[in-house]
Image (tube, rainbow, N blue to C red):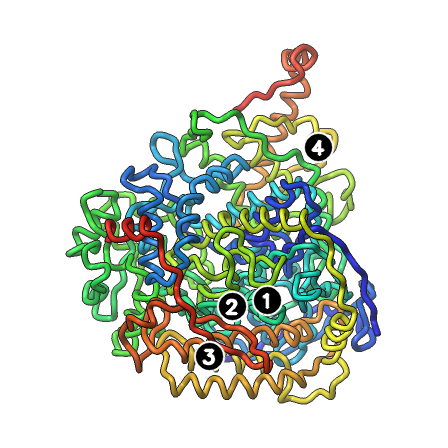
Amino acid sequence: MTRDATFRIWRSEETAPGSPGSGVASGAHHDYTTPVTEGMVVLDAVLEIQAKQANDLAVRWNCKAGKCGSCSAEVNGVPRLMCMTRLSDLPLEKPVTVEPMRAFPSIRDLVTDVSWNFAVKKKIKPFKPRPADAPDGTWRMAQDDVDRVMEFRKCIECFLCQDVCHVLRDHQKFDEFIGPRFLVYAAALEMHPLDVEDRLDDLRREHGIGYCNITKCCTKVCPEHITITDNAIIPLKERVVDAAYDPIRLLGKVFGGGSKSKA
Amino acid sequence: MPGYETVEHDVLVIGAGGAGLRAAIAASAAKVKVGVVCKSLLGKAHTVMAEGGVAAALSNVDDRDGWKVHFTDTMRGGQYLNNYKMAEIHAKEAPARVHELESWGALFDRTPDGRILQRNFGGHRYPRLAHVGDRTGLEMIRTLQDHGIHQGIDVHMEHTVLTLLTDGGRIAGAFAYDRERGRLKVFRAKAVVLATGGIGRSFRITSNSWEYTGDGQALAYDAGADLMDMEFVQFHPTGMVWPPSVRGILVTEGVRGEGGVLRNSEGKRFMFEDIPPLYAAQTAADEEEGWRYTTGDKNARRPPELLTRDHVARCINREVKAGRGSPHGGVFLDIAWIKEKIPNSVEHIKRKLPGMYHQFKELADIDITQVAMEVGPTTHYMMGGVRVDAESQMSTVPGLFAAGECAAGLHGANRLGGNSLSDLIVFGKRAGDYAATWAKEHALGRIPEEAVAAAEREAMAPFERPQSADVAPFLLHSELQDCMQDLVGIVRREEEMSRALTTITGLQSRAARVAVQGNREFNPGWHTALDLKNMLLVSEAITRAAIQRKESRGAHFREDFPTKDEAAGRINLVVRRGPDGAMQIVPEPVPQPTAELKAIIEEMK
């Protein structure tokens, strides 16, 4: 059951053979036609084109099973993992467009510079556990408490939510807003059964949680089906508001150097 | 010539999976300057794909467990070719390393009394694998990554190391290029830790990512280090077989740990028909006992689906060859059947195996809570690798360390599931600790300018050569994969492996003429051209060692020598470059356990 399909892939402008990279972002779409068979995903087609027609077509990928979050791109304009996008779900009578994530600077072809994300993560206060529960230095936790944050810990850091978020993509608030991925990360830490760190002030002042106006675009593109907005961002927003405007907490801060309430 | 920049660290770690990150954290804690180079972005390394869990005798689920049992299980699984000292250290230290992960924020599934839950796995006598659903690897790498980024470690993402640099026989650094822009770099370091993982990309059907090109093994060999046990390649019994594009992707052993059974096209549970004597006393007598084991009955014995991976893979292979396979050339792995046993099976499966549910639903349109999966063997893990000292993980090259999959010794002839993640954290930490100590006691070596210049010329040459179809990098890679898959795979024969050697030699001479198009900026054709050398080298080592081991043991199965040979069971095969530049395979005696450890092995038999 083989047929031909055409892929309209965004390619960076050519530079001299063998030269080091220029970092120039200009480019254009190129059409490649390749045979496709049952069960194939977009990444299969792109790698086939790379192997047979364009050895220098740049694309990131690792696991090919939706577990590593490397092959993020925009397929027919929608941010997706190429390895989890089945061709049978796309209209193949017209060319399938494959483009790099638009919110991030281009490196080459489908590869973008996502280093901003790694820098942002460092700014979030790390995990800080409560003292151990048992004399042997271990903790006791209920499965229910673990389950509560499991959803957030499924994140594979594909950054598709960052790509689609209009605060970053359209308004370029990279200096003021950490984006959905890192709100999920902060939520995972804040709701971790053992964590005693307080990140609420940072979320409000440094991390720009107020910029999110809950359009839920991030939730829609998440390949791990994390309910980013409802389960991570909205509860965080509530905690931030409670913390910022709770008079008893404010008093506690003055006299006790701050404390953290666990939901 | 393009020229290069120089970066300096005390300890350079190559690879950022579980072992590399754990080594970097350990070295950094010892207050030396640490750099990590990795081929992918941080957090994408192959550890992320580990599913089932991390083996550690915490004794949370069954208090009969302990380091002695774990040690014995590991030795039995490795068919006693393991380095006993490594197996002992591993079994003793794994619990502390797992608890340490928890103190850094990792979350594992819990027992009813709130401790870390442990699950059954092939070859482990008691429930031993700490896990979180079926994404334990992700939890582990994210924990190490998120802890590591606050330890002052320099991370050089998307860099490939081309060669190690030595100074009078000791390590001096590494020569690399960054994949994004193609710039060349010299990393000077007092100690280097290899944590580069495995070799799966030399085979057609593999669960491994593109990164698994045998870099650590090849770099070490070229630097003059010994490799060992290279004939032992683990074929995981359950990879996806359909659709074609996902062939090889792993289906966790956790499916069988949770009660999944293997059936052939006649509906028969064929694993009951072939139970090796070494395991007969520990294996369930019938299906009912097997199920009781899965549900935690301490008096029941393991179902035969949980025999070691090498054995299960061969049984599947046999069923398929005998014409009793599934429509797409595998067998059936059925977890849906547990609905006969428990009322809420759909929810139970989704909670215990969320990743598998998701993977089959999205990639194959199959609901595993309702129907059986089709599975078949896939190249999964390299037991062999850099020969290291058990305590320090130092190779035979002074200052060069190795940990995790790229090191040899712990797993012997066959690795037990779950012993890989524990390997990473136990020996990753040790490699980092000892590399830091080494770095404190030694100055930087001299950078050999002539070797750097030669490596630079070699790296740039593919752009300058005339292009022709027979030296295209992807073609050469593809031919190698077919060769290894067909001739040095799960069932081996001398005649086929000799043909493989001829093919590999031919590919090596063509790879020396490999030509690429485009420029140096994130150019996968060029990347593959440079990876070929390592893939070919490890393929040659695997093949030569596999020819020399004229017996069947663990993961190495010879159709022409189908039984174990007692004499061969007392030797490890060491691979090193001889004085004439040719690869040598040298038998060396397996180190014998102390009397105390021998007694433990006997007692637990």
Q: Residue at 68% across / 31% down in the picture?
A: A203
In the rendered structure, which amino acid carries the disc numbered 2?
Leu
Instruction: Report how far apart the C-alphas of labels 3 and 4 lie in the structure.
Output: 63 Å
Q: Quadrant of residue B529?
A: bottom right
Q: Could you tell which of marks 1 and 2 lies nearer the N-terminus?
A: 1
Q: Are marks 1 and 2 on the same chain?
A: yes
Instruction: Report how far apart the C-alphas of labels 3 and 2 lie in the structure.
Output: 12 Å
**Residue with the mark numbered 4:** A210
**On-image quarter of the N terminus of chain B:** bottom right
Instruction: Report how far apart the C-alphas of labels 1 and 2 lie in the structure.
Output: 8 Å
Q: Of circles 1 and 4, which is in front?
A: 1
Q: Could you tell which of marks 3 and 2 lies nearer the N-terminus?
A: 2
Q: Of circles 2 and 4, which is in front?
A: 2
Residue A17 lies left or right of residue B354; in this view the side is right
**Residue with the mark numbered 3:** B544
**Residue with the mark numbered 2:** B227
Instruction: Name the chain letter of the residue that bears numbered label 1.
Output: B
**Disc 1 vs disc 2: Cβ atoms closer than 8 Å?**
yes
Q: Position of residue B397 (x, y in %)?
A: 60, 63
Q: Position of residue B421 (x, y in %)?
A: 46, 51
In the rendered structure, which amino acid carries the disc numbered 3?
Arg
